[in-house]
Image: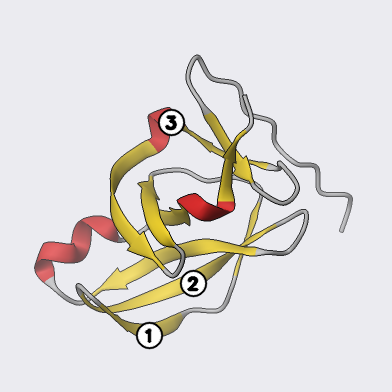
Amino acid sequence: MGLIYNQYLSSDTKVYGCKECKTHFSTQEDILSRNFRGQHGKAYLFDNVVNIILGEPAERSMTTGKHVVRDIVCRQCKGIVGWKYDKAYEPAEKYKEGKFILEAELLLPVS
């Protein structure tokens, strides 16, 4: 396996990155909702996220029901910054499948 290079994002609005190492994750245009909560408080639902490593799938009971999720780890510093929804069991929660949650407390606007 060769070297893995980080993607650098550019946007007319904010680029969100890791608070620890400033690795780019996503742009403001990719935010689908700001109405989420994580372990550290406020969190955002994103459509696309880059420069991450996905953990193993695990079934978790959350405030909106049972989901299969994977932790999201920063590829650079290896800190956990959120999770990805793989499966939602409740029909009203299916829109989350394939989407990413990044916790606001662990993010930094980098541009």
Which one is nearer the viewer's eye here, 94 or 104?
104
x, y percent for residue 31: 37, 38
Residue 57 sits above or below residue 31 on the image: below
x, y percent for residue 21: 75, 47
Where is mark 1, residue-wise? 59
Which one is nearer the viewer's eye here, 105 or 62?
105
Which of label 1 and label 3 is nearer to you? Answer: 3
**Could you tell me which quadrant the C terminus lies in?**
top right
In the picture, measured across the screen, residue 87 lies left or right of residue 108, that is left
Q: Is residue 69 visible?
A: yes
**Could you tell me which quadrant the N terminus lies in?**
bottom right
- The answer to which quarter of the image holds residue 36 is bottom left
x, y percent for residue 61: 29, 84
Q: CA distance from mark 2 to mark 1?
A: 9 Å
Q: CA distance from mark 1 to mark 3?
A: 29 Å
- The answer to which quarter of the image holds residue 77 is bottom right
Where is mark 2, residue-wise? 70
Where is mark 3, residue-wise? 28
x, y percent for residue 56: 56, 79
Q: CA distance from mark 3 to mark 2?
A: 22 Å
